[in-house]
Image: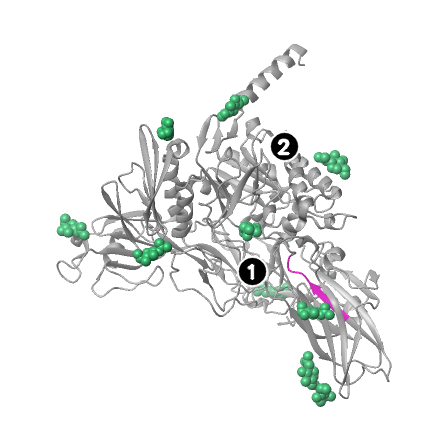
Amino acid sequence: MATSANLLLFSILLSIATFVCATNVTRDGRAIIIDGKRRVLLSGSIHYTRSTAQMWPDLIRKAKEGGIDAIETYVFWNAHEPVRRQYNFNGDLDLVRFVKTIQDEGLYAVLRIGPYVCAEWNYGGFPLWLHNLPNVELRTSNQVYMDEMKNFTTLIVDMMKNENLFASQGGPIIIAQIENEYGNVMSPYGDAGKSYIEWCSNMAVSQDIGVPWIMCQQSDAPQPMINTCNGWYCDQFTPNNPNSPKIWTENWTGWFKNWGGKDPLRTAQDVAFSVARFFQFGGTFQNYYMYHGGTNFGRTAGGPYITTSYDYDAPITEHGNLNQPKYGHLKQLHDQLHNLESILTSGNITNTDLGNSVTATVYATPDQSACFLSNANVSNDATVSFQGNNYDVPAWSVSILPDCVTESYNTAKVTTPTTIIVKKKNMAEDEPSSLNWTWRAESVEDTVLQGKGSVASHQLVDQKAAASDLSDYLWYMTSVDLAPNDRVLGSNMTLRVNGSGHILHAYINGELIGSEWATYGVFNYVFEKNATFKPGQNLITLLSVTVGYQNYGPFFDTIQSGVIGPVEIVGFKGDETVVKDLSSSTWSYKVGLNGMDNKLFNPENTLSLWQSEELPINRKLTWYKTTFKPPLGTDPVALDLLGLGKGEAWVNGHSIGRYWPSYLADEDGCSAEPCDYRGSYSNNKCVYNCGKPTQRYYHVPRSFMDEEVNTLVLFEEFGGNPTLANFVTVTVGSVCTSSKENTTLEMSCEGGRPISGINFASFGNPQNTCGSFAQGQCDTDARGFLVNECIGKESCAVEATVKNFGEPCGRGTGPFRLVVEYLC
Ligand SMILES: *[C@@H]1O[C@H](CO)[C@@H](O)[C@H](O)[C@H]1NC(C)=O
Ligand SMILES: *[C@@H]1O[C@H](CO)[C@@H](O)[C@H](O)[C@H]1NC(C)=O
Ligand SMILES: *[C@@H]1O[C@H](CO)[C@@H](O)[C@H](O)[C@H]1NC(C)=O
Ligand SMILES: *[C@@H]1O[C@H](CO)[C@@H](O)[C@H](O)[C@H]1NC(C)=O
Ligand SMILES: *[C@@H]1O[C@H](CO)[C@@H](O)[C@H](O)[C@H]1NC(C)=O
Ligand SMILES: *[C@@H]1O[C@H](CO)[C@@H](O)[C@H](O)[C@H]1NC(C)=O
Ligand SMILES: *[C@@H]1O[C@H](CO)[C@@H](O)[C@H](O)[C@H]1NC(C)=O
Ligand SMILES: *[C@@H]1O[C@H](CO)[C@@H](O)[C@H](O)[C@H]1NC(C)=O
Ligand SMILES: *[C@@H]1O[C@H](CO)[C@@H](O)[C@H](O)[C@H]1NC(C)=O
Ligand SMILES: CC(=O)N[C@H]1CO[C@H](CO)[C@@H](O)[C@@H]1O
């Protein structure tokens, strides 16, 4: 038993321990200061909700190896508090575990509590119950809202404090964020918006977390909030206070994808250029948005119309593979910047404009200097004379000269090998080549056939309010009585429905008459189809489907979804058009699908009858089920759903997200390959995948699966062919690398696998890019040499010399390159 003296001693020791461990995080006009030292900090966004707890250590370790100092995440309110005061911090939502994993890897954490987060996340992270509270107005000076925001913020802060996770307590969290990009949307909120920001700041300060708070895109952020920049480039950004360092909270490493959209990529050269420019012009903290983008599991994608994949062309791919050369090229840059930490955070800065968009920057202390030469000219490769030497600085690039003499890095000169990630079928020999499906129809007895709902109203309701985010599906049902002599009645009648989100399936008297859906950007649609009505009662059933709620914009939270009306029957009598407006008829509502209520996606549910005969193809509102063994090995797994229409998929009861492979990306507007990295990036600049399914492959985390028997359930809304579905692994297929004449070419595979083949190898002046290399006019084939030297080895180095490969085209035609594409 502890004596009181022991207890006293113990608490003294404890307070000493706390004192010793505490990290002192402050800031000045130059940098974030940690334990008295100004820091260059490279941070990367990894959202815990977009991967699994099993993946976290590997992702964070890869970030650390990539030269990242801090992991940044939002906190997702609607994931944690789906029902008011009912919380979920379990499993893959275990925020404390995520932050501790960051700590275990020895990195810092940046916690963007928000709790509004945008993030292409459903409803920007707000729980729907918040919208449905009486007298609430979101993101403004409204007491109901502010009380809830404070309640959740305090909950998160207390949770972190209880686990000693703030740096002031010895934990990894060095920075926290309140609100998010409010400055971008603030003016429509008027004075209420201004006082809201004051309130946010005071509320944050009152949380007493002992580390700095930031507000991003908030030029009027009150002190002590640090206002920070988000964007593709932030080199021209200046904080609003001389005591705030230049911080870049969102550097978009790529862009998100929408249904119907193309794949947006951002080149390694351009991301590196934007980062190097930021540090050239005095920046000291920058964060990659995203460093790992991940997956929008379940119904978490916002937008609307954001795809299930949130890959973002980030340095780590959705599935956790390294995105090369981006990852490696940025790692080299991080190493350069870290080596210059002290001079970048304390040297005097002198910029010299050398004309033609070339700028030289000297960082100097009495005993050291470091230089940047940047060429922001879009087309002109410059030879820059600087302090008596000449430097070749390609267009749209930055060179780093750590001693102001020798170039150690240039953002346009990529030396990291390129990898091609491939999908492989990797099933055991004894696995049948296709899955064995059973099926059952979604029961529509109550809705399509009887029009029976659970609530009635004399108006068309907002789907957000009615469905309260419990389902994507809301049934709107009404009946219309047409007398035989009704003027609207005739053979030629049209049902017209105005909707704003996002998909509609319309039935009259039990028959589907058609479907309609919105396109990204314009979320309104008008459904118009001819139909046959009969004299007497006619049942109209409208199934409205949302594809994620809006997450951005002023008053985004109030935008109505679903059938907004009018709903009309249009008939003709001679030349006369007769319109019957049903908008204020008696409408009956039902939320969701019977199959969801009966948890058909749950493998433990054995009550339901699934049939194996007469498997229907292209049937709407149909459930499919199968069992499967996962592909062999430990590589990440994806489900290929080519041939399916639209719906949702579950593996062992875990929703892997919405699928919609039948939605093809636009035919036109794809970029040339390779994309020209020069010139300002925008999300339409380097786009690919024209005319192909927006998203064909769906990530199935290994932790969702067992070794032996697993259940896959699909709910197919549009109609498709499940027999074409199959599982694949996602892995590095081939690697491309090259070396200049008389240098060493090094080859190796991720994860210590052996080099298993040489697709292409040529010494001379080979043409084209990785995946499509071809010999130039006078190359010598180097395959034989490399096959002999490298096959079966984990790594291999060869000299790119005439001695090894012979002289292409005779003497004096060099310099040459050795170019190789090899298999892992
Ligand atoms: C934290 O660091 C700042 C300056 O970097 C210093 O002024 C302050 O005294 C330090 N606080 C503690 C508790 O060490
Ligand atoms: C949040 O509100 C509930 C009442 O709804 C209250 O019991 C709880 O203490 C509040 N939590 C915080 C952290 O303020
Ligand atoms: C880029 O370089 C070209 C060629 O030297 C020059 O004509 C042009 O003015 C430069 N543009 C900028 C913005 O500096
Ligand atoms: C920066 O320049 C100022 C004024 O020339 C000088 O006083 C100061 O010592 C310099 N600081 C460093 C770190 O070189
Ligand atoms: C497919 O399922 C049916 C019904 O469960 C069963 O009879 C048949 O043997 C299965 N075929 C394979 C290849 O597993
Ligand atoms: C439908 O209405 C249009 C326009 O009034 C008319 O031209 C057409 O003949 C009608 N069709 C039938 C089948 O009645
Ligand atoms: C129906 O929607 C269309 C397209 O969004 C719009 O132009 C039209 O005004 C709407 N009709 C009514 C009556 O609101
Ligand atoms: C309805 O049918 C008539 C002819 O039967 C046709 O002219 C008209 O385009 C149709 N309207 C729609 C919306 O399909
Ligand atoms: C490579 O080295 C060889 C032998 O030293 C030399 O003759 C040749 O010029 C070099 N090539 C280049 C491009 O430097
Ligand atoms: C102003 C702006 O467009 N901000 C966006 C920055 O990127 C993040 C992530 O893609 C979005 O959530 C913001 O809306």
Which residue is farthest left?
Answer: 811
Image coordinates of residue 593 in percent, x first then y, are: 73, 61
Quadrant containing the N terminus is top right
Compared with 149, 232 (above or below) is below
State whether residue 314 appears in this view.
yes
The label nearer to you, 2 versus 1, is 2
Q: Residues within 10 Å of mark 1 (few under 14, many from 20)?
A: many
In the image, 346 versus 81, the foreground residue is 346
Image coordinates of residue 303 in percent, x first then y, are: 61, 56
Quarter holding residue 614: bottom right
Residue at 67 percent across and 41 percent down: it is 195
Give yes or no for residue 545 being in the magenta stretch: yes
In the image, 505 versus 704, the foreground residue is 505
In the image, 223 versus 207, the foreground residue is 223
Q: Tell me which amino acid carries mark 1.
A: Asn
Q: Tell me which amino acid carries mark 2.
A: Val
Mark 1 C-beta to ligand 10 under 8 Å: no
Give yes or no for residue 143 being in the magenta stretch: no
Q: Is residue 85 left or right of residue 783?
A: right
In the image, 403 versus 154, the foreground residue is 403
Label 2 or label 1, whichever comes before in sequence order:
2
Q: Quick one: SS at disc 1?
A: loop
Magenta stretch mostly in which secondary structure? strand
The stretch in magenta equals 541-548
Q: Quick one: SS at disc 2?
A: helix
Task: Determine which of the numbered discs, if any, sits on residue 547 in the image.
Answer: none
Q: Residues within 10 Å of mark 2 (few under 14, many from 20)?
A: some
Mark 2 C-beta to ligand 2 under 8 Å: no
Residue at 75 percent across and 55 percent down: it is 465
- Marks 2/1: CA distance? 37 Å
| Residue annotated with mark 2 | 205
| Residue annotated with mark 1 | 258
